Image (cartoon, rainbow, N blue to C red):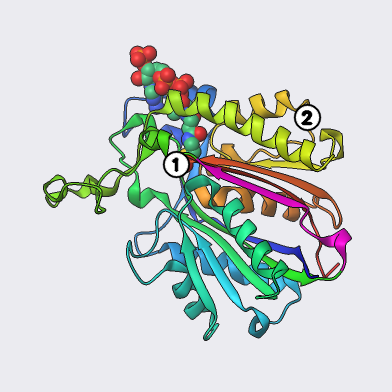
Amino acid sequence: MAYAAFRSIGAYAPKKVLTNEELSTMVDTTDEWITKRTGIKERHIADENETTSDMGVEAAKIALERSGIAKDDIDMVICATISPDYFCMPSTATTIAKKLGLEGVTSFDISAACTGFVYILSIAKAFIESGMKKNVLIVGAERLSAITDYTDRGTCILFGDGAGSAVISATQNKDEAIIDVHTGADGTYADLLMSPNGGTGSPHDALDGEAKACFMQMKGNETFKVAVRTLTKDVKDILESNDIKSEDIKHFVPHQANYRIIKAVGDALKLTKEQVVVTVQKYGNTSGASIPMAINDIYEDGSLKAGELLLLDAFGGGLTWGSALVPFSPLLR
Ligand code: ACO
């Protein structure tokens, strides 16, 4: 049987930085409020002409280069995004594949909001373990600034743009393999976080040429409580079902939505500060890109080493959630 190994990581953040101070000239907020309630200090914002696929391509190039796997051996591309280049078609994944010169490669998007990266990891793992694919390029890419309402202080302070990518490939060595991925969803809570207009679920006249048609809306406080409850249960479940103790985790990489959520889950698992990866202060919430961007940060600062165990954990609109136990298994050392 083939197993799936997490070979490499890459990420991209656009050059332009939007600080809390700048946001406080746009809406009624302050650096102090944003820092205290979320931990966010700044976020990166794409250029007007920079698309989600452009950012995904930059992250993917780095992941490919670090993987040691030839570009022509990639046999599937999956992109997790809620801010695709085009809402219906083509998918952002096919555009990324085209820009990378990956001809004829199976490519598709999935929509699972902030849990997107954990979802595409689970799909890559399943395709590889079934023997259908060998080398899967996964990309979480978001231009959330395009679907953010910059007159709504409850949401616009949270979101940023960026992309992260990884190469997942087949191995016969079980020690290198992704141990487990859990995913779940509950549409009962759909109204906590949604872009209510722009699809077939919204009345046609609700659109009416409105620029705000696809903007995100969120019941932040209720979402916060469900997030802490769901994430804590989810990570406890995946650790217990794989008989792994929290002290065996080298790096806990949660979705970066709010420092208070990250801390609450880390405390519930009795994780030390050194185990918990926090990047929310510099990128804000980049939804499907947040986990790979955070993994890339610990790779680039030298703290992520071959063989170390990552625990990933995410929660997002849908509602969706997921967690994963992933040894970092690079081919190039
Ligand atoms: N600046 C100043 N005051 C503000 C701001 C702001 N930017 N935003 C809200 N407030 C005010 C509110 O109006 C409210 O005022 P009131 O008491 O006079 O009514 C007060 O601050 C408290 O508001 P809450 O919404 O209760 O604040 P909370 O502490 O919950 O923080 C936040 C809000 C940051 C949004 C938090 O609830 C949160 O992070 N929620 C979870 C987000 C999340 O995890 N989403 C899922 C992933 S995202 C995805 O899937 C795309």
Which of the 4 image quarters holds residue 272?
Answer: top right
118 versus 273 height, above or below: below
Between disc 1 and disc 2, whose residue precedes?
A: 2
Please report the bounds of the magenta region as a residue range: 173-185
Q: Residues within 10 Å of mark 2 (few under 14, many from 20)?
A: some
Queried whether the magenta region covers residue 301, the answer comes back as no
In percent of width and height, residue 275 lies at 78, 36
Looking at this view, is 304 or 246 the one in front? 246
Say whether mark 1 is within 8 Å of ligand 1. Answer: yes
- Rendered-image quarter of ligand 1: top left
Q: Residues within 10 Å of mark 1 (few under 14, many from 20)?
A: many
Q: Of the numbered discs in the image, which one, if any, rests on residue 138?
A: none
**Disc 2 marks which residue?**
271
Q: Residue at x 72, y 33 (%)?
A: 236
**Disc 1 marks which residue?**
317
In percent of width and height, residue 128 lies at 69, 69
Q: Secondary structure at mark 1?
A: loop
